[in-house]
Image: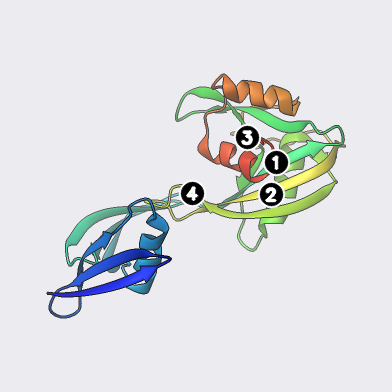
Amino acid sequence: MLQSENRFSGISLTVEFAAGGRETGVQLSDPRHLDILYISAILLNMSWKRLDRRTLVNTKFLKVYEDKVELPNGNIMDDYTVVEKPSFSMIIALDNDGNLITIDEYKYAVDKIIHTLPAGHINEGEEPLETAKRELVEETGYMGGEWENLGAYYDYPTKDLHKVYFIKATGVTRTQETKFDPNEDLTPRVISLNQLKEEIARGEWRTNAVLSALVAAKLLS
């Protein structure tokens, strides 16, 4: 057994290696500095190795795989599930008065009407910003204004491959009627930021990606 010790900003990182060079243990002198552990994972190539993949579900909107993977410690998992769904754009849109354009939408899986933001799947060959503009006008009738891509985020990186693109729009105006998809059951709603914060405080907003989008757009500070 060999040991290698590295120090980052006064924090010691000790990694144990078995014969053959495989790392078998990582010790951090101060567990509060998990960022050091993240850096060490990159430096030591602690990614998992996929050995095999079996497709369990293959539809237009969902693919489910069962992977056989080798972990950095040598253990083998032969039933790790990975889910692939289309990436989508989520729009944080404000009108000229600074009010937020939201929607109330029925979600079948949880059988509830949810406060949420306009969003939609990114079509093949489409840029996230194009998707955002298309979805906003279809779901709310609003368009125009200034647009900004706030970046791509993972929704559930433990299992899911898709990304959520947060797109912020300011100064939008309603110029068209809505054009819902046949399977959509939603109602546009325009609220002030004060009302938004009050509803969140009461626990009325329950979707992780939506709350993350509002934080990314700096609307909750």
Q: What residue appears at the point 14 percent right and 74 percent down from the top-left corner?
A: 18
Where residue 72 sits in the image (x, y, percent)?
Answer: 24, 67
Q: Is residue 206 above or below residue 41?
A: above
Q: Earlier in the sequence, mark 4 or mark 2?
A: 4
Marks 1 and 2: CB-CB under 8 Å?
yes
The residue pinned by badge 3 equals: 182
Within 10 Å of disc 3 (Cα), the crowding (few <14, some 14-19, many 20+) is few
Task: Compute the Cα span from label 1 to label 3.
Answer: 24 Å
Within 10 Å of disc 2 (Cα), the crowding (few <14, some 14-19, many 20+) is many
Residue 37 sits in which quadrant? bottom left
Label 4 amino acid?
Answer: Phe
Q: What residue appears at the point 26 percent right and 67 percent down from the top-left corner?
A: 14
Which numbered marker is on residue 61? Answer: 4
| Figure label count | 4
Task: Compute the Cα span from label 2 to label 3.
Answer: 25 Å
Secondary structure category for the residue under label 1: strand
The residue pinned by badge 1 equals: 92
Label 1 amino acid?
Answer: Ile
Task: Compute the Cα span from label 4 to label 3.
Answer: 16 Å
Which numbered marker is on residue 167? Answer: 2
